Amino acid sequence: MLNRLRRLRSSAAMRNMLRETVVRPANLVYPIFVREGLRGAEPIPSMPGQYRLGLDRLSAISKELDHCGVQSILVFGLPSAKDDSASSATSRGGIVPQAVAELKSATPGLVVITDVCVCAYTPSGHCGLVIEGEVDNDSTLPVLSAMALAHARAGADVVAPSAMMDGQVAAIREALDGENLSAVAVMGYSAKFASAYYGPFRDAADSAPSFGDRSGYQHDPANIRHAERELLEDEREGADILMVKPGLAYLDVLLRARQLTRLPLAAYMVSGEYSMIKAASERGWLDERRIVLESLTAFRRAGADLIITYHAKEAAQWLNES
Ligand code: PBG
Ligand code: ZN
């Protein structure tokens, strides 16, 4: 029996027939950083191959994605001005609403997801408003709701609150429903751990906390039961998609999430994971293509429907070749 299966697997056709897990370009989501006032693209030093983009670059990017079969994009905004109340985050003419409109007019079929968080919009760099030196959960909720509304009005298909404030999914869901935007989905960053893997992102998004760290609102990497509770809580609050983040170091959490909920799941292979693979590949220490495709397969095997990855474009091209 064993020998027979082994012999069958030596044929490429049989291997394909028996393959349990498949990655398609349509499973991938490409994250981008859009900078207000920028023309062209600005390389991100800690993420080789990734750029902060001006609005003028978005139509080309969306067409490239469309061409290689990636159907979704996750937009992070970098405003030209920050203030303590994150007013540039909630403005209808803000950088993300502008980016959404631009992407949608270039490629109407593209599924546009927007990040909803204030850390790039306030001088403190925290994911919530800081009041008397502390991150204040409840006064952040209306800001996140207003931000989500601004994105949804501009045409976002999915809003993704990443601030890790308690009640953020419910607050946003209620705000959207109240404005006739019930068709806009919410993707919860439900199991988001306080992680060193976010290092390059904070550089890219200029969103590092100016004091303290995010351990007050992001999960302790040591705790899986806490993450499970938050996944279920986000589902109860009305999330349409749940996320686990970072990726490879948290596949156990992803598998648990898959067992706990019937909602679609997203895994975020974050900036640090991207940069580690790039750095080792540049030195010839790793085979980038094989590492990336193996990693994406692992996410799918563990239960991810969607994988958010800075490698989305390259990976889609590799998948299309094979
Ligand atoms: C912040 C946010 C972070 C990421 C997405 N949204 C960083 C953080 O929590 O400090 C990380 C993404 C990445 O590392 O690629 N709301
Ligand atoms: Zn944040």
Image (tube, grey):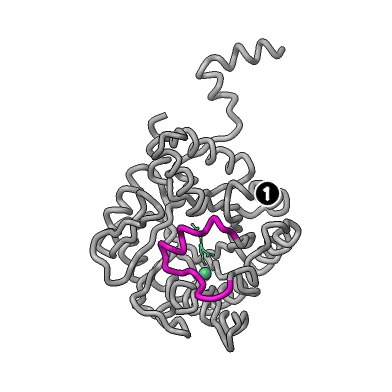
Q: Is residue 253 above or below residue 220?
A: above
Residue type at mark 1 is: Arg
Q: Is residue 146 above or below residue 155?
A: below
Decide if ligand 1 comes within 8 Å of the CB at mark 1. no
Q: Quadrant of residue 244?
A: bottom right
Q: Is residue 194 left or right of residue 232?
A: left
Q: Is residue 228 left or right of residue 242?
A: right
Residue 73 belongs to magenta span: no
Q: Is residue 138 above or below residue 95?
A: below
98 or 254, which is in the foreground? 254
Residue at the image position 31 percent from the left and 53 percent from the top = 61
Residue at the image position 57 percent from the left and 51 percent from the top = 267
48 or 120, which is in the foreground? 48
Please state the horizontal and vertical placement of residue 106, each as a whole percent of the image.
Answer: 29, 58
Q: Is residue 221 above or below residue 318?
A: below
Q: Is residue 62 left or right of residue 118?
A: left
Point out the image quarter for the N terminus.
Answer: top right
Point out the image quarter for the C terminus.
Answer: top left
Q: Quadrant of residue 133?
A: bottom right
Please state the horizontal and vertical placement of residue 63, each as a whole percent of the image.
Answer: 30, 50
Please state the horizontal and vertical placement of residue 65, each as a whole percent of the image.
Answer: 35, 48
- Which residues, given as a range, are shown in magenta? 195-212
Residue at the image position 52 percent from the left and 59 percent from the top = 198
Please state the horizontal and vertical placement of residue 30, each as a whole percent of the image.
Answer: 42, 52
The residue wearing badge 1 is 258
